[in-house]
């Protein structure tokens, strides 16, 4: 499953709202934490949803987030569209 541009924008906004893309939790730099193209890495443990990886441009710290936990309901509309 690939994420659409609209889904990526929602995820990026959610990360920004939570402060993930403002300050790095490891080095504390206030340079923006680079969201590395919101890379699709694979599937979460539930086997249905992709993981998103963010990275710091200063120290290289990466964090991963399961999309279904980060933005609950993001895929409910997609599933409805597939059923039609």
Image (tube, grey):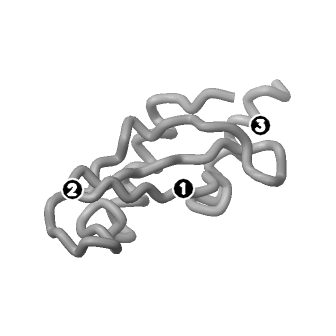
Q: Which residue is mark 1?
A: 64
Which circle marks residue 25 in the picture? none
**Residue furthest toward the front?**
59
- Give the foreground label among 1 and 3: 1
Secondary structure, mark 2, is loop
Q: Nearer the viewer, residue 20 or 10?
A: 20
Residue at the image position 41 percent from the left and 51 percent from the top: 54
- Residue 22 % position (x, y): 24, 65
Residue at the image position 28 percent from the left and 49 percent from the top: 34
Classify the position of the C terminus by image quarter.
top right
- Residue 71 % position (x, y): 57, 58
Secondary structure, mark 1, is strand
- Give the foreground label among 2 and 3: 2
Would residue 64 be found to the left or right of residue 1 on screen?
A: left
Would residue 67 be found to the left or right of residue 31 on screen?
A: right
Q: Which residue is mark 3?
A: 79
Classify the position of the N terminus by image quarter.
top right
Cα–Cα span, label 1 and label 3: 24 Å
Cα–Cα span, label 2 and label 3: 38 Å
Q: Which of the two discs, 2 and 3, labels the residue nearer the N terminus?
A: 2
Q: Nearer the viewer, residue 19 or 82?
A: 19
Q: Which of the two discs, 1 and 2, labels the residue nearer the N terminus?
A: 2
Q: Which residue is mark 2?
A: 58
């Amino acid at each position: 499953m690939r994420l659409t541009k609209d889904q990526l924008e929602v995820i990026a906004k959610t990360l920004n709202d939570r402060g993930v893309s403002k300050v790095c939790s490891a080095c504390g730099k206030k340079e923006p934490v680079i969201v590395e193209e919101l890379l699709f890495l694979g599937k979460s443990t539930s086997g249905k949803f992709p993981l998103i990886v963010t990275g710091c441009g200063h120290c290289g710290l990466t964090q991963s987030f399961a999309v279904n936990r980060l933005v609950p309901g993001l895929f409910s509309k997609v599933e409805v569209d597939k059923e039609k």
